[in-house]
Image (spheres, helix red, strand yellow):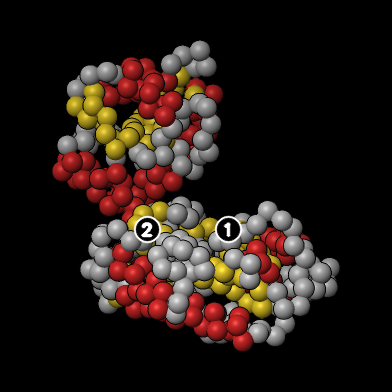
Amino acid sequence: MPTNPFSHLKPMTADVSPITVEERGSRIAKARRLMVDSGIDALYIETGAGLLYFTGVRWGPSERMLAAILPARGEIAYVCPAFEEERLKELITLGDDVRTWEEDESPYKVVARILADRHITTGTIGIEESVRFFLFDGIRKEVPRLEFVSADPVTIPCRAIKSPAEIALMQRANDITVAAYKASIPLYREGMSQQEFRDLATAAYQALGVRGGIDTQFGESTAYPHGSKELKYLKLGDVILMDSVCGVEGYHSDISRTIVFGTPTQRQRDIWELEHEAQDAAFRAAQVGAPCEDVDAAARKVITEAGFGPDYKVPGLPHRTGHGIGLQIHEWHNIVRGNKTPLAPGMCFTNEPMIAIYGEFGVRIEDCVYITEEGPRYFSQPSPSIDQPFA
C-alpha cells in the first residue's frame, strides 16, 4: 500500500455556499409566526443544532449556560458566561443583545431579566427539545409564573422542511461520502482489522476536506444493525457492511453499503437482491402526501413476503426503515409504523431497510432521499449490484 493512498484526492468544499444571514432571518420569521399560532411567547434554545439552525452560532454544550432567547415579538437575546462574551460576539450575525453572568452569579436570573425586558412576565415559554433538564429546572424556578411547554410545534415545522440551500449542502456531504467510499473500498485486504479500515477512511475524508468516517463490520457481526464490540479480521468470503457519515456546514450524509470480500455465494446474492428490492419499494412509496409509515410498510412487505419476519422479528428487518436527517444525523420524521405524518417537499430521510440474519450475516443498503414537488429524489444512487457498490 502506498504511503499516502489518498494523495490524488482534493478537498471538495472550496465552493460550498454556507447558509446566509438572510435565510436565518427568514427562519426566525417563520418561527415567530408559528409561535403566535401556538400561543408561545418565547423560545429558549440551548447550544446544539437548534442554536446553529436559527442563529448560525456553533457552540459545544458544557455545564455553563449559553443560550438564545427568541421572543415572538422583540429582539433576540443571548446568555453566556462573561468570560465568553467576546468570543460569542465574534460568532453572532443576528441581534446584538448579549447578557452575561459571572461565575458566582445565576444565569437563570439573566434569563428572567431578558424575558421581563420583553414584557414576558406571564405567558408561555417553549423549551427546545435538546435543552438539558438542569437548565430548564433552573429557569422555571426563577420565573414560576410562566408556563413551560415543548417548542416542537415551532422547531419541527421549521427544521424538518429543508430549503434549497440546505438540500445543496446535504448533496455535497453525500457526494463527498461517495468519493470517500470509492477511494477506501479498494484498500480492503485479507487480515485487515476493522479499525485499520476505519483509520484509512478517516484519512480519506480528511483529504476530501471534511471530518467523517466509515464504520465497518465483517462476517457474522454484519447481522447486528450497529455492529459488534468484537474486533474482527477480514477473511475471504466475508460479508462487509459499511456505514458512513460526514458533515458540510453542519449538514449530514448517511450512506451504507454491503459487499463481499471475494466471490459472493448464491445465498449472499439472494439476500442482497431482496434488500435492494425492499429499498426500491420504499423509494417508490415515498410520494408527496403519503404517510411516513407507508414507506416503512412497503419495504417490510417485500421482506416479509420472502419469508422473513414478520414485523421486527429476526431473521428480518429489526428496525424502522429510515429516519429524518439534516443538521442532526437522526431528525424527524421517522419512517416507521404509526407515523402518519404526510411526506412534503423539503423533507429528507434515510432509506435503509435491513435484513439481519443472526449467525450468518446482514445486508443494508442506505441512501438519503429528499422529497420534491414531483416526488422522491436520491442524494446518492443505490448500489447497482453486490459486486458494484456505486454506479
Specify few, some or many for label 2: CA neighbours under 10 Å numbering under 14, 14-19, or 20 or more. many
Q: Residue furthest top?
A: 104
The residue labelled by disc 1 is 226
What number is the disc on residue 334?
A: 2
Q: Position of residue 87 (x, y in %)?
A: 53, 33
Query: Residue placed at 33% from the left, 17% from the top?
Result: 142
Specify few, some or many for label 1: CA neighbours under 10 Å numbering under 14, 14-19, or 20 or more. few
Q: Is residue 23 above or below residue 96?
A: below
Q: Position of residue 258 (x, y in %)?
A: 59, 74
Screen quadrant of the N terminus: bottom right
Give the amino acid at mark 1. Answer: His
Query: Residue placed at 27% from the left, 29% from the top?
Result: 148
Q: Is residue 182 above or below residue 64?
A: below
Report the Cα–Cα distance between label 1 and label 2: 18 Å
> Is residue 345 found left or right of 93 in the rendered image?
left
Q: Is residue 209 above or below residue 115?
A: below
Query: Residue placed at 49% from the left, 17% from the top?
Result: 102
Camera sees residue 169:
no
Q: Is residue 74 above or below residue 208?
A: above
Screen quadrant of the C terminus: bottom right
